[in-house]
Image (cartoon, coloured by chain):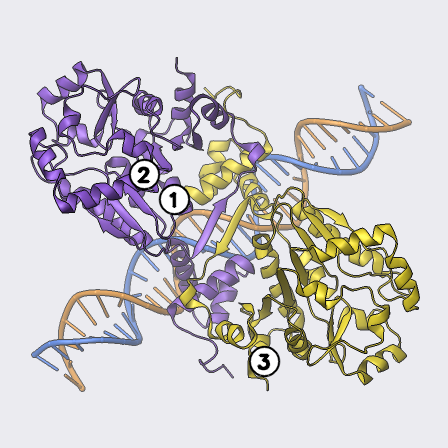
Chain colours: A yellow, B purple, C orange, D blue
Amino acid sequence: MTHPDDLSLSDRTSDTLTAAHLYYMQDLTMDAIARELHTSRSSVSRLLSQARASGLVDIQIRSPLDATSRVEKLILDRFQVTAHVVPVPDHASDVDRLERVALSVARILGEFVDSNMIMGIAWGSTMNAVSRHVTPKRTHNAQIVQLNGAGNTRSTGLDYANEILQRFSTAFGARLEQFPVPTFFDDPATRTAYWRERGLRRLLEMQRNMDVALFSVGSPFSNVPSHVYVGGYLDDDELDALSDAGVVGDVATVFYRADGSTDGIPLNERGTGPELSVLRRTPRRICVVSGRSKVDSLRGALAAGLITDLFIDESTARALCEGP
Amino acid sequence: MTHPDDLSLSDRTSDTLTAAHLYYMQDLTMDAIARELHTSRSSVSRLLSQARASGLVDIQIRSPLDATSRVEKLILDRFQVTAHVVPVPDHASDVDRLERVALSVARILGEFVDSNMIMGIAWGSTMNAVSRHVTPKRTHNAQIVQLNGAGNTRSTGLDYANEILQRFSTAFGARLEQFPVPTFFDDPATRTAYWRERGLRRLLEMQRNMDVALFSVGSPFSNVPSHVYVGGYLDDDELDALSDAGVVGDVATVFYRADGSTDGIPLNERGTGPELSVLRRTPRRICVVSGRSKVDSLRGALAAGLITDLFIDESTARALCEGP
DNA sequence: AAGCGGTTTGAACATATGTGCAAGGAGTCA
DNA sequence: TGACTCCTTGCACATATGTTCAAACCGCTT
């Protein structure tokens, strides 16, 4: 009595789709769906998981505009930045905090991504966490470009950064433009020379044309320093130099002071991150921050005008507002 | 140790929002959410239900374009209409069928509605079912206009139609323009006269400027006749006249033949539904159909070019395609 | 303050959903 | 063909979620 397949297609994807319809649009129980699909309840449960994980089912939360939290309004007023405050209980550990903010961002990121876009992405603990959860969204002709080099003296960084970017790339079906250089050159001249290479010029050109940039802020002199400060990318002398120059943080390994200035910070001459002016011309600049220890660095980034959209955990957001 | 409310707003709506975030964006269990919100698990369950019912949480299913079902493609090819086939098992009753299609439409309707729109809506069993499930979406300055009068000789129809339209109106926060006339006038001249009234002209003008029309098709001579054919709106003579004229169905009580023509059908001179030309100039014309008995009527509506988007249950869709 | 509808709450129960695991099936290779 | 791996399936159990119901609460009135 079942129907020929010429009219009802019956492969895996289509079952997933049907299950999603029945579950989310018609409120059937998994049990009922199992019967309609001639399979077991467990399988339906798995189909639905897959439907969610693969972005086939898209769950959004639309806060009525009049219900944006007070903190979000405050941040908009003071910094002209759209804040997305992620609720995290105050007693949560920094690891929890990061994980939960990352998960939220991963779920919503699709909103910012579309076909034909160029997306610049940095790397680090935060981007890593986001990448591990990002929900796929099918796009055409999208392009991801790595914002800064990832090699270090122990040369383990390449894989790390690459895995991260790769995850985004497959999630969005975007081409990936890697940046196969060390994070910092030893000699500024090498960088100058290298930047003249055709391949590199193409990449830098791409960065100048980004539609979206995704990054976190690094915070060097806190009790929880960021990946780049402990991963063997910088030696003690270099750290001292940063400290002397009054650096409070970095975005994609470009360092800045509390007031957002970058002039006369020697390490920037050798770094591979995008000039802040390049970042600033990007229409959408999404920054993900979690943990109070990043507040000072975040302030610097805000002062530098690097951010248009800020994802931040609740208590860090509060700390940001309560500050001087 | 809790925080003052000056930064974390704490009323009901905000709890709902937070719960939704924690559940849908951060994958916490309701139990964990209950702890963060200092309430019981049951309450969280209720908060989340409300979040879904109130459209705060928006669940969409995005079929990859290459996975549209064969039937949907077929319908697009043959009728130039975007079909949304609702999976319903073949053995389902007509009531089930209707209910499930209606639920699906109700969930997705928000997609078609936006601020500043004028929405024309018909009434009948199908619209009733949809209205009872429609998920709210906040809009500004939207306007709903009733497509056809609802009074009948027993004069019970007014309330019926009104309830339906009212539900849509509150769900979208739209102003409601009712159509306080009988479904059919006894004398065409009365209609002509009435249509010249200022209030009516405003309403008819609104219909001419609709952005979206939402309706089903009526099917008079099937074993499951539509509301208007059994609700006391038409007497036997009138039904005979329709039959004689070769009528196969109606949209908003405007009758048509199998080829989509309407000329020389006397009842149309006295009816209050919009001329089909008015319907046809509406950019988006959403038709909801369930049950095989509506196939012939649906064919007529398609022939008349009344539909741009068709929501239809699976086996009716198949019947539509298999036809002559 | 006591009394009264109407609403909200959480504990207890009833269902529904997620997952480890062993069995079965499909593909590959010798 | 048989031995092997890898993947999928459904059962049984562990969790998570939905719902009922009596108690607590709230806003009014007397």
Q: Are marks 2 and 3 on the same chain?
A: no
Query: Mark 1, chain letter?
Result: B
Q: Nearer the viewer, residue A73 or A163?
A: A73
Element type at mark 2: strand
Task: Report helix, strand or loop for mark 1.
Answer: helix
Label 2 CA crowd tier, 10 Å (few <14, some 14–19, many 20+) = many
> Quick one: label 3, few (<14), some, or many (20+) residues within 10 Å?
some
Asked if disc 2 and disc 1 are in contact, CB closer than 8 Å, the reply is yes
Tell me which chain the residue with mark 2 is part of: B
Which of the pair B281/A159 is nearer the observer? B281
- Dot in front, 2 or 1: 2
Q: Answer with mark 2 or mark 1, whichever residue precedes in sequence.
A: 1
Identify residue for label 1: B109
- Report the Cα–Cα distance between label 1 and label 3: 41 Å
Residue identifier under label 3: A319
Residue at point 17%, 34% (across, down): B272
State left or right for residue B233 relative to residue B204: left
CA–CA distance in space, label 2 to label 1: 10 Å
**Three-letter residue code for mark 2:** Leu
Residue drawn where x is 31% and y is 29% of the image: B94
The vertical placement of A72 against B199, above or below, is below
Q: Residue B214 carries which label?
A: 2
In the rendered view, does B174 fall on the left or right side of B13?
A: left
Q: Please tell me if label 1 and label 3 are on a single chain.
A: no
Residue A208, position as x, y percentages in the image: 72, 57
Q: What residue type is labelled 3?
A: Ala
Do callouts 2 and 3 mark residues in contact (Cβ within 8 Å)?
A: no
